[in-house]
Image (spheres, grey):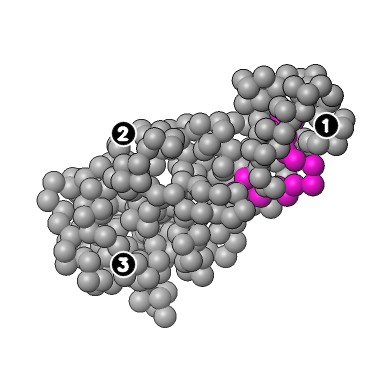
């Protein structure tokens, strides 16, 4: 192998963590053509867990490395949000059994098809853009931490793959509220809301103003009021569009008198 190709191989291996993957699209764009990749695979430097995807020989395939590839190498505006973001923050004991193994991604960019072909233990689920009309923000080194927080996003370390983009707890809760479609979903959000004692009202106000899901906003506010956290008394909903008429998530439930959303009548029993 030539010195030039040795250098390219070293740069590639250095950029890949033990859990990292890289697509053939990215490789071609950076001068790693098919013949060169075939040589790397034949020499035992790389393996291909599925067509069009490569990783270091001896590496381990984990969701963290896949998401890092999507965010940093593919340049896709996809963040970890909703249910899995809350599980990652330590609330997995509140979630439905097994659901914490579904990595929930949100954003305007769709995932490439190869993601679903990888033999991962976890399932990676694309949940769409989510319930917000916030402007798209690039995930680059030039984007400041404050600019991310202004979108309800933050970087968190997911070892061994490095820093990944997550929803803040405030944004993740509203994303989960938007996903709720039955009594089970409401029980789940209610149990999590009980643990949300440190949410930040100013950030919530911004997210509520930019949330276009009437259901998500009403459900969030009804359950937040129910648990009476200290931050709720500092939350202003001035300028938040809560729509008209009632919304129902469960048949035969109880209508919340303030937020006009029908909730299960047995919430207290579910928390017990």
Alpha carbon distance from label 3 to label 2: 26 Å
**Res. 266 image quadrant:** bottom left
Query: Between 38 and 91, which is closer to the camera in this rendering?
Result: 38
Residue, far bottom: 272
Q: Residue at x 16, y 54 (%)?
A: 237
Question: Would you say residue 69 is visible in this rendering?
Answer: yes
Residue, far left: 238
Which SS class for mark 2? loop
Residue that numbered label 1 is attached to:
41
Residue that numbered label 3 is attached to:
198
Query: Between 2 and 139, which is closer to the camera in this rendering?
Result: 2
The residues colored magenta run 51-65
Q: Residue at x 66, y 25 (%)?
A: 27
Residue 135: mark? 2
Q: Is residue 215 left or right of residue 94?
A: left
Query: Between 18 and 213, which is closer to the camera in this rendering?
Result: 18
């Amino acid at each position: 192998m030539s010195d030039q190709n040795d250098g390219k191989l070293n740069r590639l291996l250095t950029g890949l963590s033990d859990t990292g993957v890289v697509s053939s699209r990215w490789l071609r764009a950076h001068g790693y053509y098919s013949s060169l990749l075939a040589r790397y695979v034949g020499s035992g430097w790389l393996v291909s867990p599925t067509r069009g995807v490569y990783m270091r020989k001896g590496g381990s395939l984990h969701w963290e490395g896949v998401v890092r590839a999507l965010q940093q190498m593919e340049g896709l505006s996809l963040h970890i949000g909703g249910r899995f973001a809350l599980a990652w923050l330590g609330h997995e004991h509140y979630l439905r059994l097994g659901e914490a193994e579904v990595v929930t991604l949100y954003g305007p960019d769709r995932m490439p098809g190869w993601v679903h072909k990888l033999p991962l233990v976890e399932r990676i689920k694309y949940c769409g853009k989510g319930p917000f009309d916030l402007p798209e923000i690039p995930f680059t080194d030039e984007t400041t931490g404050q600019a991310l927080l202004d979108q309800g996003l933050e970087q968190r370390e997911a070892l061994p793959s490095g820093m990944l983009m997550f929803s803040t707890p405030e944004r993740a809760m509203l994303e989960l509220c938007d996903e709720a479609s039955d009594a089970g979903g409401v029980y789940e959000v209610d149990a999590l809301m009980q643990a949300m004692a440190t949410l930040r009202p100013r950030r919530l106000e911004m997210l509520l103003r930019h949330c276009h899901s009437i259901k998500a906003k009403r459900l969030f506010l009804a359950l937040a009021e129910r648990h009476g956290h200290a931050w709720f008394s500092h939350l202003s909903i001035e300028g938040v569009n809560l729509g008209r008429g009632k919304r129902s998530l469960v048949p035969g439930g109880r209508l919340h008198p303030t937020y006009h959303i029908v909730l299960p009548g047995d919430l207290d029993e579910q928390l017990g």
